[in-house]
Image: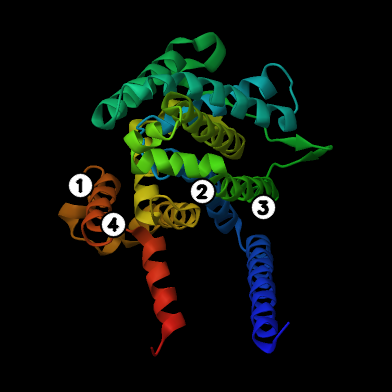
Amino acid sequence: MDLRESYSQDIRIFDKFYKWGWIASLVAGIVVFCQIGGDYVAYMLNLIFINIIAAVGLNILSGFTGLISLGHAAFMAIGAYTSSILTVKLGVPFLLALPASGALTGLIGFVVGLPSLRLTGIYLALATMAFGFVTDEMILQWRSLTGGADGFAVIPPIIFGLTFDSYKKYFFITFISLAILLFMAKNMVRSSFGRTLMAIRDSETAAETMGINLGWYKAMAFTVSAIYAGLAGSLYAHFILFISVDNFTLFHSIGFIVMVVVGGLGSITGSVMGAIFITVLPEIISFTKDYLPAAVKTGYSLQAAVYGITLMLFVIYRPIGFYGFWVKIRNWWRTFPL
């Protein structure tokens, strides 16, 4: 081994240790920040982690496969109600109810994804939006099981005799779940399955010419996306301890789309960035309302207007999202001053 190869190997080892050291420091900082902060900090971190899981699932469908879905909140609702019914009415442990909710939601996602071979673009978006409306109506009408319009009271998770009945305790459930699901998503998009999804996104005709079964892989993309949404819904139900159809509306589905677009389509890291930004944005709006003109702060659905403006600005000026902007800055810094 000559000097140049030895130097390159040392650089790779240093980069690896630097990367994992940075991740370990970040994890330790988040855990300490949650535990020493108040309930509000723990609440926001839990909500951010749950939204990241849902956004990653939607990005696998929309960013990596190129399919539009306006029914992501409906998948979350299915996961939330499944986990709640299993734990409250059937006495199933949370550790079994959580994966069961993801499995059932994934099965429904596979069925919903079957028409995606014939439907594309706006027609697929309308079909998934209709699925969301049907899901909400079933929840309202099936009162004996879901509680209907009165909602459904959920119990805190109990794991190995420990009750996670506070935001700081529940943080460990959402944090560990997020770490596992992010690791799985990262490896999934790097695998042959992920490359196949990206091939379908780039050109369905070319992918089909290469022998890719479009219907199967599109349905599987819906399945994976629904599993992530179902798990996020389960975590969300046991987090807020009361669910109703108002928690899973079309507005929430649009919010997840905004997370994916703002963070960066086709990027797991972008999903994390977009979910953090959009989750914190309503809090920023509530804090700044007092400083806005009276006609603006008293207007109907200020949050929806801000979502729309944010989405338009990113689509026009930053279509690559936060992650693409970060990559540009990182590449510029690495090549500076050249």
Image quadrant holding the C terminus, namely bottom left
According to the image, label 2 marks what residue?
52
- Mark closer to the observer (3, 4): 4
Disc 1 residue type (three-letter): Gly
Label 2 or label 3, whichever lies nearer to me, is 2
Question: In whole angstroms, how far apart are the C-alphas of marks 2 and 4?
Answer: 20 Å
User: Rounded to the nearest whole Å, what is the CA distance between mark 1 and mark 2?
Assistant: 29 Å
Residue 110 x/y as whole percent:
50, 23
- Which residue is identified by label 1? 299
In the image shown, does 293 or 56 lie closer to the viewer? Answer: 56
- The residue shown at (22%, 49%) is 298
**Residue in view at x 42 percent, y 54 percent:** 274
Q: Which residue is mark 4?
A: 319
> What amino acid is found at the position of numbered circle 2 in the picture?
Ile
Check disc 2 and report its element: helix, strand or loop: helix
- Which type of secondary structure does the marked residue at label 3 adopt? helix
Instruction: Report the side of 90 relative to 335 (left or right).
Output: right
**Label pair 2/4, CB-CB below 8 angstroms:** no
* Mark 3, residue position: 168
| Left or right of 100 in this view: 264 | left
Reading the chain from its start, which is encountered first: label 1 or label 3? 3
Q: Residues within 10 Å of mark 3 (few under 14, many from 20)?
A: many
Discs 2/4, front: 4
Query: How far across and how far down the image is residue 144, in percent?
Result: 54, 9
Picture quadrant of residue 324: bottom left
- Which residue shows up at 60% across the image and 60% down it? 38
Mark before the other along the chain sequence, 1 or 2: 2
| Helix, strand or loop under label 4 | loop
Q: Position of residue 305 (x, y in %)?
A: 23, 48
Q: Taking 53 as reference, is 23 above or below it?
A: below
